[in-house]
């Protein structure tokens, strides 16, 4: 598997993770108290950030070696 295919695979897996977390979090955002809504939003933002950060770091590592 070359680097371009690996990066596309990571992007697809990342999109599935982000999409799934958004789908699950929407259910909690609609029916819970405000405190839980804030926690869900923080968790969602952190999941999106960590997923994108992981994809970018691995892409740079594949392209430049270290």
Image (cartoon, rainbow, N blue to C red):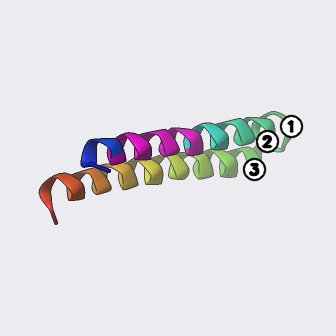
Residue at the image position 79 percent from the left and 42 percent from the top: 28
Viewer-closest of 47 and 59: 59
Instruction: Please tell me in which quadrant of the rendered image residue 9 appears.
Output: top left
Please state the horizontal and vertical placement of residue 41, each as a whole percent of the image: 63, 44
| Residue marked by disc 1 | 31
Q: Position of residue 21 (x, y in %)?
A: 65, 44
Mark 2, mark 3: which one is toward the viewer?
2
Q: Which of 14 and 32 is in front in this view?
A: 14
Between the residue at mark 1 and the residue at mark 2, the CA separation in whole angstroms equals: 6 Å
Mark closer to the observer (1, 3): 1
Badge 3 density bin: few <14, some 14–19, many ≥20, Cα 10 Å: few
- How many badges with numbers are in the image? 3
Which residue was labeled with disc 3?
Answer: 35
Q: Residue furthest bottom?
A: 66
Residue to which mark 2 is pinned: 28
Q: Which residue is drawn at 84% across and 43% down?
A: 32
Tag shown at residue 45: none
Q: Position of residue 12 (x, y in %)?
A: 48, 39
Q: Magenta segment range?
A: 6-17
User: Residue 5 versus residue 53: which sits nearer the camera?
Assistant: 5
Q: Give the left or right position of residue 53, taking residue 13 as reference.
A: left
Does the stretch in magenta take in 24?
Answer: no
Q: In this view, does 31 lie to the left or right of 12?
A: right
Q: What element carries label 1?
A: helix
| Quadrant of the image occupied by residue 26 | top right
Q: Are marks 1 and 2 in contact (CB under 8 Å)?
A: yes
């Amino acid at each position: 598997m070359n680097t371009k295919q690996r990066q596309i695979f990571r992007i697809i897996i990342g999109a599935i993770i982000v999409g799934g977390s958004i789908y699950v979090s929407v259910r909690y955002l609609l029916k819970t108290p405000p405190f839980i809504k804030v926690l869900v939003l923080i968790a969602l933002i952190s999941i999106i950030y960590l997923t994108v950060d992981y994809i970018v770091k691995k892409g740079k590592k594949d392209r430049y070696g270290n």
